[in-house]
Image: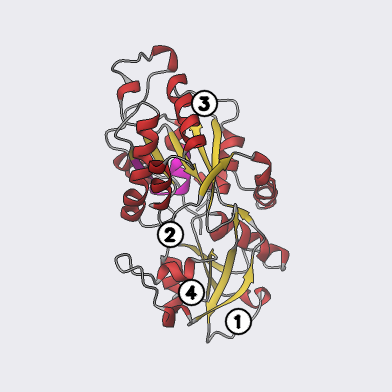
């Protein structure tokens, strides 16, 4: 049920980051040439289709790149959520938007490394600093509660997804359902889990609270097929989950890091910054607010409960 970062995925990661050489250390950087003159490399977790993320985050990366003295910002979407952490650790990207679980794991695993993440800012999305996950079934399903899921097929999101795995798996465990043994679990990233349940290839699934609508919204017209959304029923809703965190590598050269920090602090009042936030997929971000690590304590608790860390996510299938 869980993925492994095999050589195949490692190769996919390298392909996704083509053209991204390792930065020199801050001590070796000069203001001319070298890494400091390269476009800012912004990593994004794969919470949507790759092309949608690259297109939607391009104005954001351009803005941060221009403001930090690294114009021509580039957006990189890794094959998996954990791939972003691998990219940060290997200096293949300079900064990244991490989902809650990826952020918590990065802080834990990279604490004593030169690349430990520096939290810079958090996004407000749909008027809130938090969101919720849902567990859903088809409307015509006989499944009414989490307890009814025992022995059923469940479409989780990526193993490192907070709303697609961490919180719903924790809810199942609290309901007496062992997510490792009592259900037939499969990990399907993005909207494919919703489609699997819709096509009766899985009995239930988990996603973020607007994930059902997102699976049936046309990219061009922005219209949602409400008839298809109506064919689902939500049987459980998670506790509030923090949206995520925008971080930078601690070994990023100081001039870039200082300007990047300032850019995120000013982005809500700069017309170009506000426009960049609006372009982000799935409705845009309302604003960026100062980083608050403590809001992720509940994520840490659930990760501990399920014994999740970077090593377990790398090695468990």
Residue 5 rendering spot, x and y as whole percentages = 44, 45
The reply to whether discs 4 and 1 touch (Cβ–Cβ < 8 Å) is no
From which residue to which does the magenta span run?
75-85
Task: Tell me the SS state at disc 3.
Answer: loop
Q: Nearer the viewer, residue 151 or 85?
A: 85
Residue placed at 38% from the left, 52% from the top? 279
Residue 15 rendering spot, x and y as whole percentages = 29, 41
* Discs 1/3, front: 3
- Which of disc 4 and disc 3 is earlier in sequence? 4
Mark 2 residue crowding within 10 angstroms, few (<14) / some (14–19) / many (20+):
many
Q: Is residue 82 magenta?
A: yes
Mark 4 residue crowding within 10 angstroms, few (<14) / some (14–19) / many (20+):
many
In three-dimensional space, the C-alpha distance between marks 4 and 1, rounded to whole angstroms, equals 12 Å
Task: Tell me the SS state at disc 2.
Answer: loop
The reply to whether discs 3 and 4 touch (Cβ–Cβ < 8 Å) is no
Task: Tell me the SS state at disc 4.
Answer: loop
Q: According to the image, label 3 marks what residue?
A: 250
In three-dimensional space, the C-alpha distance between marks 2 and 4, rounded to whole angstroms, equals 25 Å
Q: According to the image, label 2 marks what residue?
A: 282
* Discs 2/3, front: 2
Q: According to the image, label 4 marks what residue?
A: 202
In three-dimensional space, the C-alpha distance between marks 1 and 3, rounded to whole angstroms, equals 47 Å
- Which of disc 1 and disc 4 is earlier in sequence? 1
- Which of disc 3 and disc 2 is earlier in sequence? 3
Residue placed at 34% from the left, 42% from the top? 75
């Amino acid at each position: 049920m869980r993925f492994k970062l095999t050589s195949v995925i490692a190769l996919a990661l390298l392909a996704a980051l083509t053209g991204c050489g390792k930065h020199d250390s801050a001590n070796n950087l000069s203001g001319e040439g070298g890494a400091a003159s390269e476009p800012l490399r912004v990593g994004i977790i794969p919470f949507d289709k790759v092309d949608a993320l690259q297109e939607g985050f391009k104005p954001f990366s351009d803005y941060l790149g221009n403001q930090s003295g690294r114009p021509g910002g580039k957006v990189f979407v890794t094959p998996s959520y954990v791939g972003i952490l691998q990219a940060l650790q290997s200096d293949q990207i300079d900064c990244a938007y991490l989902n809650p679980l990826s952020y918590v794991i990065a802080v834990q695993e990279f604490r004593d490394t030169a690349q430990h993440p520096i939290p810079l800012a958090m996004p407000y999305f749909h008027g809130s600093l938090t969101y919720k996950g849902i567990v859903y079934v088809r409307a015509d399903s006989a499944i009414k509660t989490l307890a009814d899921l025992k022995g059923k097929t469940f479409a989780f999101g990526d193993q490192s997804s907070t709303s697609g795995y961490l919180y719903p798996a924790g809810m199942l465990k609290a309901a007496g359902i062992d997510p490792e043994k009592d259900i037939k679990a499969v990990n399907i990233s993005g909207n494919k889990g919703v489609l699997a349940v819709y096509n009766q290839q899985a009995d239930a699934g988990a996603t973020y609270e607007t994930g059902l609508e997102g699976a049936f919204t046309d990219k061009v017209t922005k219209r949602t097929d409400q008839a298809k959304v109506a064919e689902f029923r939500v049987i459980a809703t998670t506790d509030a989950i923090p949206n995520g965190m925008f971080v930078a590598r601690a070994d990023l050269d100081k001039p870039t890091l200082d300007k990047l920090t300032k850019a995120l602090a000013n982005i809500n009042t700069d017309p170009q910054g506000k426009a960049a936030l609006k372009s982000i997929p799935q409705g845009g971000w309302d604003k960026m607010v100062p980083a608050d690590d403590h809001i992720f304590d509940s994520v840490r608790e659930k990760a501990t409960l399920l014994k999740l860390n970077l090593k377990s996510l790398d090695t468990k299938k």
